[in-house]
Image (spheres, rainbow, N blue to C red):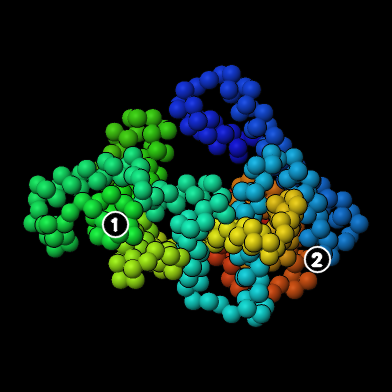
Amino acid sequence: MKAYAPLFLLTTLIHTKFRINLKTLVLKTFPLLMRSSLFLGVVASVFPLLVCMNSKVGNHSGPLYFLLPFISAFLGIIIEKPHRRRELAVYVANQAIELLYRMGTSRGFLPEIKNGREILFTVSFAILVYFHRHHRKVLANSVNQLLKVIVGVESEMDFLEERVSKIYFWYKNKFPRSLGFIFSEDENTAPNTRKCKHSYGCKTYAVVGFLKAFLLGFFVKTSFVFLPALLLGPHKILSNFSKLVSKVLVKSTLQFSLFWGIMSGGPRGTECFLRWIRGTDDGINSLLAGFVGGLSVVFFSSIDVAMYIASKAAESLFNELVERNVMKPVNHGEVLLFSLSTAALFYASAYEPHNLRRSYFSWLMKFSEGHWAHFYKAFTPVRLEAGVPDITAYNKWEKEFANEVISKYITPQQMAQHYS
């Protein structure tokens, strides 16, 4: 329950505009919290129970360690509320796809792709921008809302964009020469091409989008620094204000802000430019614009973000094929996807943990409150006897990472007594 309680409480506060409503908490939030906690509890408890039962028999076959977590994941996910199953399935599928790729490279079946996550992000973002501009209904509502914030809707301005545009126009009129290297003084407020639907100049449209997203990225980065201190009390912010500011004013903050800014301003400017030189507004413009926006990844590269964007792009392509009757929807597909992906992750945690994402391995340890550390060490002889793919990489991973994580949960005395 403690894993989900802060999330559900924050969501409730946002929906109620930070007005604490006891009735809403008791009748809506608490039942949802209990249901999601039960789902997670079933997944976390059924698997070790099955493992213990199997250990008494003495069977440590690999396929069985895929089947056991599949059963526990299936029993857990059918408890969860249906509208949350898809996001959960997408999350574990992202982890599983990366795992399968690493398993393939460690066995020599797949090549290692240089800058793979950057290429994946750029191509996937281009696909999402295309669908957002020309076929929104194949995108999930959450993705459409996210792209509306990033790329924008030409025929309207959101609240933040209106404020940024007012500041920009004030600055442009107050100090026209300082912006002369970007804009001509006689730029009018109408679009530069008849194909554009925004109500002001194309250059202004692109720059305002860049500034809006840049400021949004800066705000997000700043929030990650100040919010933890705020939760400890306002006095923490006042007493450590200079240190907190120094954490914000670093290179990574600028890079993160540029990532957001180019991801928004790049597609806007590219679309306007292509409409001007091609004289048309079609899917090619949107794909190229999305590709330019995706180049923002050079400033901030994250495997989590890349895999999330890629999964949403794959989901939109699947929905498009279903709509064209090329493919048929899979009944309860999210249940099957979650169960298979969880099974793959748990199997790898037993037999080849070095191919797991390090953050996921650490999460397993933290979530199980150290019980997974004991399972990992107890299973080591079985793992080595079965043969670990790329044993050199495994030994390096265990020495540089795993032992440090496990030492937080298993004392040296326990290690010497039980696992030496």
Question: Foreground residue, 21 or 301?
Answer: 21
Q: State the separation of the CA atoms marked 2 and 1.
A: 54 Å
Drawn side of residue 164 relative to residue 60, left or right: left
Picture coordinates of residue 7 (x, y %)? 55, 37
Q: Quadrant of the C terminus?
A: bottom right
Residue sitting at x 59%, y 18%: 23
Drawn side of residue 161 relative to residue 122, left or right: left
Quarter of the view holding residue 96: bottom right
Residue sitting at x 75%, y 52%: 331
User: Looking at the picture, which amino acid does disc 1 mark?
Assistant: Ala
Q: Quadrant of the N terminus?
A: top right
Drawn side of residue 284 relative to residue 198, left or right: right
Residue sitting at x 60%, y 65%: 98
* Residue 251 appears in the rendering: no
Picture coordinates of residue 29 (x, y %)? 61, 28
**Contact (Cβ within 8 Å) of mark 2 with mark 1:** no
Pointer 2 residue: 62
Question: Foreground residue, 145 or 276?
Answer: 276
* Residue 17 appears in the rendering: yes
Quarter of the view holding residue 78: top right
Question: Foreground residue, 311 or 363?
Answer: 311
Drawn side of residue 153 relative to residue 164, left or right: right
Closer to the chain start, of discs 2 and 1, is: 2
In the displayed image of the protein, which residue is found farthest to the right?
57
Question: What's the mark number on residue 206?
Answer: 1
